[in-house]
Amino acid sequence: MGILKILIVVTNINVYENRELETGLWLSELTHLYHEAIANGYEVTIASPNGGNVPIDPESLKRFTLDKISKQYWNDPSFRELLKNSKSLTNVYMQQFDAIYLAGGHGTMYDFPNDINLQNIIREHYEIGKIVSAVCHGVGGLLNVKLSNGRYLIQAKTMTGFSWFEESLAKRKKEVPFNLETELKKRTSNYKKAFIPMTSKVVVDGNLITGQNPFSSKEIAKVIIQKLKNKR
């Protein structure tokens, strides 16, 4: 078998709708899977809806949120250069990957849910049994994905994503364009969340893997890698 390939999808959006607060990718939600994938010799492609620069949420660079792995990558000039030059989803549309992973950050709430290229990539990979995964607000990118039979991908699926109470703790309830927890429940997904907010929660339902919040980044990375190894 050839080298396993992972597509990590990230946001291009750097501000909330009010244009006052900055947002973007939550860095650790990229770095942990990236780190595990590279360590295992996998090929990683970082793509975004528009391609080009990937803004980083300044909150994810603070002392208490920038973990060791993320700090290591953030201090690496070549990695920072990689984030300035993400591929566009249009460019990777015809490629096939072994796993798709939607990294989070509040920016994804604006450019993930209605992106047709993203929906098509997810549907095509999911229907041939490839891993589709998402963490935190990145889970919003799954909301509007329909399968070939017209059903929503997440209909009747057991999954997780950033909870409304966590949104309250993050002081972003008034900023966000929608309530992710409510929207997931509307799609009749069997939504699960951690008993204690802001602690790791990863849910696996077949080839769909979701993580609840930034603190799930390390666990979901390990689950995805293990699932890839089991498929070999």
Image (spheres, helix red, strand yellow):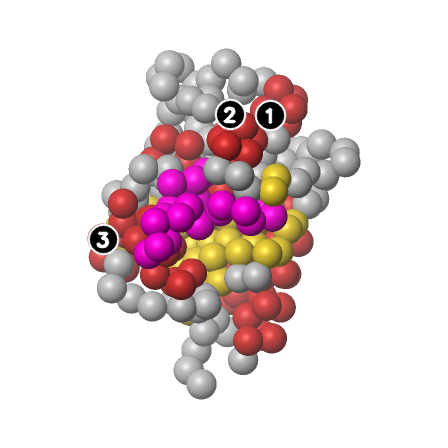
Residue 54 visible somewhere in the drawing: yes
Residue drawn at the location 69% of the way across and 34% of the way down: 198
What's drawn in magenta, residue-wise? 140-160
Q: Amino acid at mark 1?
A: Trp
- Can residue 83 be spotted in the picture? no
Q: Nearer the viewer, residue 216 or 87?
A: 216
Quadrant containing the N terminus is bottom left
Residue 72 placement, left or right of 109? right
Between disc 2 and disc 3, whose residue precedes?
A: 3
**Side of 110 where 192 appears, left or right:** right
- Which element type, helix, strand or loop, lies under badge 1? helix
172, 205: nearer the viewer = 205
Circle 2 is placed at which residue position? 179
**Amino acid type for the residue under numbered disc 3:** Thr
For disc 1, the marked residue is 164
Chief secondary structure of the magenta span? loop
Q: Earlier in the sequence, mark 1 or mark 2?
A: 1
Q: CA distance from mark 2 to mark 3?
A: 28 Å
Q: Kindly report which numbered mark, 2 or 3, lies closer to the viewer in this rendering.
A: 2
Sequence-first disc among 1 and 3: 3
Q: Residue furthest bottom?
A: 1
The residue that disc 3 covers is 90
Element assignment for label 2: loop
